[in-house]
Image: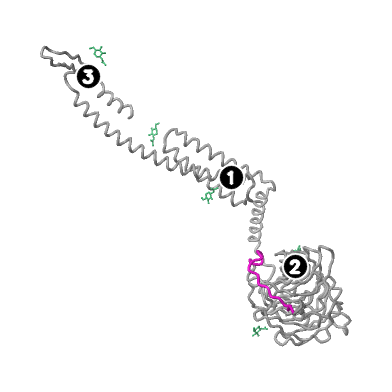
Amino acid sequence: MLALLIFTVGLLHAHAVSMMNSTGTVNEEGVCQCSVILPDNTFPADRLEVLEVSSRELSTSVHQEIIKIQNYQATLTEYIFKLKNLTRRVEIIELGGISYTELDFELLKIEIREMESLVVKLKQSFNGSSTLVESLFVEIHNIAAMVNQLESYDKNNVLAVRREIASLRKKLEDCKKNQDIPTLPPVSYGTCNHGGLKNISKPFVVQLNWLGFTYKFGGWGKDTLVGAGQDLHWMSPLSTDARIMNIIRSYPTYEDLLLYKRPSDMVLSKTLPRNNIDYTSCGQGGGMILFNNSMYYNCYNTRDICKYNLNTGTVERKTLTDATFNNRFSYSSSLWQDIDLASDEDGLWVIYSTEENSGNIVIGKLNPITLSMEKTWVTTQYKPAVTNAFMICGVLYATRTLSTRQEEIFYMYDTKTNKDLKTSIVFDKMMENVQSVNYNPNDHKLYMYNDGYLVTYDLSFKPKENLS
Ligand SMILES: *[C@@H]1O[C@H](CO)[C@@H](O)[C@H](O)[C@H]1NC(C)=O
Ligand SMILES: *[C@@H]1O[C@H](CO)[C@@H](O)[C@H](O)[C@H]1NC(C)=O
Ligand SMILES: *[C@@H]1O[C@H](CO)[C@@H](O)[C@H](O)[C@H]1NC(C)=O
Ligand SMILES: *[C@@H]1O[C@H](CO)[C@@H](O)[C@H](O)[C@H]1NC(C)=O
Ligand SMILES: *[C@@H]1O[C@H](CO)[C@@H](O)[C@H](O)[C@H]1NC(C)=O
């Protein structure tokens, strides 16, 4: 088209020159005369007209082509921009500037694939060669290769391992689906429709207490009243000497606990004039339990039981007659826990000992409103030989240490039959010392405070025996 335009202009130009290239003469009267010799005696007006028409047609089509090219260019600019962004992101990952996840890789790969297909389309519409598109295509291929390489360079092979785990998990799930023989009765939380404790899962570490691992003693959990709201999570690290419970911290949800977000602290001591501190309302040892939105615990330096209402902050207390305290008969792996509160499907319990029972465990059923003792059971199990104890469906379970890594439930006492029983349910520990264990009937889990770590265990139960 451009060549044609030049041709038209050239033709006109030649015409003018030939008109100019004339010889001039001056006649006798001094008048200048010019004679013009035209190269052709017939002017090609019809040819010019044809040319003009075709030129117009061509110029519209050139205009259209230019618009098309502009469109392509806009798309190309966009792609180039996108490509630069991708390149930058790949570079950042390559330099290890950010910690990347599999998700980042997957996103990058999807974007690259998208761009690749777009460029292929663009190439087709160009129908031929365009160096811009060609180089774009090459660049995208390079980036795709780089991302694949980066993934394989991942030093810890984390991604590969995670993929393997995912596939394994999938296989396991499929396996489970195919193997639909329910060996256990359906779980119904909050009820005792089973034949007692069967087994304990592996420990699941939820979090470290917020003060750190030097705070090795304390307790944690959720509200253990059957049917109570299960969102709130509490923890209460004791002073590092395992004695004073001064702060109850609560988190409104499990997620908040995991992130240490939105904590509320309830402080039990009072600061008196001249910097003296009144510990009267504080707790002692790791035997506390949350029941019906009140924390129940052994009051500091006494044989009293305290009830602290989380809503109102009021403290009620009542003396536990004959109970020994102040390390007379605490548990073997934690000091100051002479009086241990527990709760199960049947309500609130207290596990303690007396001089009269020679330091053996006494189980008491406690009225949660009046704090008075409703009934007691004496056992033959020496309390200081036990690491901790909890109640499930009116049965006491006591644990002892097997090794730094293993614990065993070795003793049971059924308050319904007044009989005790030796048993052996072995379970793993994360850390060496068990400082407190609470059972929650709402989720059939144990909540253990394990050298400062907050740990849970899932419990499984035997089917109910048929007494026919
Ligand atoms: C003009 O005409 C002369 C002869 O008259 C010729 O020699 C010359 O080349 C012509 N010039 C052009 C530009 O055509
Ligand atoms: C790349 O583009 C995304 C949006 O598509 C933007 O969020 C991101 O900040 C850009 N990255 C860089 C390094 O420019
Ligand atoms: C692409 O070019 C070929 C010849 O090189 C032609 O036959 C075909 O029609 C063209 N396609 C388009 C979409 O322009
Ligand atoms: C008890 O649970 C542990 C941990 O999940 C498991 O290794 C063990 O085989 C289970 N024992 C029984 C008797 O089910
Ligand atoms: C729980 O507390 C409420 C008052 O806050 C009381 O009415 C109710 O009886 C308590 N339930 C138990 C089982 O203690």
Dot in front, 3 or 2 = 3
The residue labelled by disc 3 is 20
Q: What is the number of the mark on residue 200?
A: 2
Which secondary structure, mark 1?
Answer: helix
- Depth check, mark 2 against mark 1: the one in front is 1
Residue drawn at the location 74% of the way across and 82% of the way down: 306
Tag shown at residue 90: 1
**Measured from the top left, where is residue 237 in percent x and y?**
75, 70
Please tell me in which quadrant of the rendered image residue 297 appears. bottom right
Mark 3 within 8 Å of ligand 1, using the beta carbon: yes
Report helix, strand or loop for mark 2.
Answer: strand
Query: How far across and down, in percent of the image, does residue 19 sit?
Result: 21, 19
Q: Is mark 2 within 8 Å of ligand 4?
A: yes
Quadrant of image for the C terminus: bottom right
Classify mark 3: residues with Cα within 10 Å, few (<14), some (14-19) or many (20+). Answer: few
Q: Residue at x 47, y 37 (%)?
A: 133
Inspect this view and state whether residue 213 appears. yes
Q: Which residues are magenta?
A: 255-272
The amino acid marked with disc number 2 is Ile
In the rendered image, the residue lying farthest to the top is 28
Q: Residues within 10 Å of mark 2 (few under 14, many from 20)?
A: some
Spatial CA span between label 3 and label 2: 113 Å
What crowding class fits label 1: few (fewer than 14 Cα within 10 Å), some (14-19), or many (20 or more)?
many
Q: Is residue 13 above or below residue 360?
A: above
* Observer able to see residue 395: no
Quadrant in which ligand 1 is drawn: top left
> Residue placed at 50% from the left, 42% from the top?
116
Q: Eyeballing the image, is 454 above or below 95?
A: below
Picture quarter with the N terminus: top left
Specify the amino acid type for callout 1: Val
